[in-house]
Image (spheres, rainbow, N blue to C red):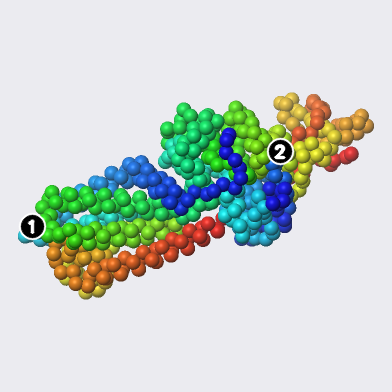
Amino acid sequence: MTTTHSMAKPASFVVTNAVFIGRSIRLSLRNTEALIMAIMLPILLMLLFTYVFGGALDPTGNYVDYVVPGIILLCAGFGSSQTAVDVAQDMTSGIIDRFRTMPIRSLSVVTGHVVASLVRNLIATGVVIGVALLVGFRPSAGVVEWLGAVGTITLFILTFTWLFAAIGLVAGSPSAAAGYGFVLLFLPYLSNAFVSTDTMPKWLQGVANHQPITPVIETIRGLLTGTPVHDRAWWAIGWCLLILLVSLVWSLWSFRRKAGRR
Amino acid sequence: MSNFAIEVKGLRKSFGSQIVLDGIDLAVPAGTVFALLGPNGAGKTTLIHILSTLTAPDQGSVRVAGYDVVTEKNEVKRSISLTGQFAAVDEMLTAEENLRMICRLSGLTSAESGARTAELLKQFGLSSAMGKRVKTYSGGMRRRLDLAISLAASRPVLFLDEPTTGLDTISRRSLWDIILQLKEQGITIFLTTQYLEEADQLADTISVIADGHVVATGTAEELKSRVGGEVIELRNEKEEVIRMISTNGSIHDVRQTLNELAHTVPQEARVSIRKPSMDDVFLALTTKNLEGTRS
Ligand SMILES: Nc1ncnc2c1ncn2[C@@H]1O[C@H](COP(=O)(O)OP(=O)(O)OP(=O)(O)O)[C@@H](O)[C@H]1O
Ligand SMILES: [Mg+2]
């Protein structure tokens, strides 16, 4: 053996994060079931909403233009919920103890999962848009609007991934994490993602119009298909940043608490 | 830095109302092998977790490589490496990927990591399985990988919590050689084990903990001599040990012991007299199994 055993220089911040991001992406690629789901789900949902429900919901045949943002968010929500499972898996297996005894910022384990989720879900978003274009989606957006839409989607994915990461950190096991995460996946249905909120009961309209998903949907829809955006973009960004901040603080807090507990 | 790699004074730790460590004092000189023995649940893993900054002590001063485990966590982390009682490996990665990852995180460059990984895979007999995912490994292979990972970066203090549990005889011997080589390089090794022969073979100093206290410390020889000169062992016809009594080995003492036993053991029982083993020490210190030491 050739190494010396003086106090070693620890890995740099950049290397640490690069290693954990690489690990998480590799794990994503190896989790075959989740990967297939992440690609199949957008395709199936797109076909389902366009051909099965589409005609009933909008006989003019333009339903696909209406529903694309909703499906993007539904898939992104589903895709990022995997983060809760991945994080819980790491926190409940022995590997986290190894990382904690090393001179690195061990929270980077979580950051790695977050970045991998971002990559996975942007790809899934690409699949949704690809399939949408095939089944008749005709966006009116120019370059600026596309950038705006992709930016909004990215912020949304990042926000929900951190939220799921926090859930993964507080959950006692990967299956508990999956269970808690599941509840959040109903949010897109309680918005104007698939149908206009006008037909909902009054109390539900109140919920649907004021929950965070609705302004995000309206912003993306507006940017892609030219419906009015007004102040919805600010609401969308505001909601996302607020949830992101809360999730970050929550994650940090629970990571510290778990680290100190044993 | 003092010449003690590990210094523990008045360490206490409870989980809820359960007192696990109730005033532990230890000092391990740098460059030596130290073995911690104790029955299941004695607090060996808890102590290792405290020494490796995973668990916070309730009370007492704990210094590793000269640094305080509470106030100088980062310095301690830079000085140690740990193989826990349960494998800390990434199941979804291969052995090679696991090793590379930890090498990189330990501050080695990409090229150094590759070389070190190959070296460790070879040393731990994992070269042929290096491309398979760890979840397909046998228990012993996983253990060997776990140990290899802990040696990715060479640190002055190495903690091994039951390192040879689950290893076959060949792997166990080869790990013993590796531990002794590491000691040659000046590395301090703190290990726990249930194999008393292991402590006997490897350790410069052995401590036994029970009921939250250190009940004995010394070299293997010192501990054995504490138990008494010799042990009278009685076996039944199935070669099972039915009694063990320590003796000073004199005719007088042996005769007296046997006379006393004549009433309580079957007459077919076979008698042998031998030097005490680490097992005897362990039993004597942690249970009441070995009867009154007369010497
Ligand atoms: N996180 C924890 N919460 C509550 N109790 C704990 C915790 N960790 C350990 N204990 C308790 O502390 C005691 C000592 O446990 P520890 O794992 O340190 O024993 P050990 O000496 O390593 O045993 P073994 O030989 O079985 O590995 C046990 O009674 C255990 O139940
Ligand atoms: Mg233990």
Foreground residue among A20 and B86:
A20
Determine if residue B171 is in view: yes
Foreground residue among B3 and A124:
B3
Q: Which residue bears the numbered disc 1?
A: A61
Foreground residue among A227 and B221:
A227
In the picture, residue B279 is in which quadrant? top right
The mark total stands at 2
**Residue A5 x/y as whole percent:** 61, 42
Three-letter amino acid code of the residue under disc 2: Ala
Residue beneath the point at 13% across and 49% down: A134
With B81 as the anchor, is B42 left or right in this view? Answer: right
Residue beneath the point at 11% across and 56% down: A138
**Residue B134 x/y as whole percent:** 45, 37
Contact, CB < 8 Å: mark 2 with mark 1? Answer: no
* SS at badge 2: loop
Q: Which residue bears the numbered disc 2?
A: B203
Three-letter amino acid code of the residue under disc 1: Gly
Q: Is residue B168 above or below residue A154?
A: above
Q: Is residue A92 above or below residue B242?
A: below
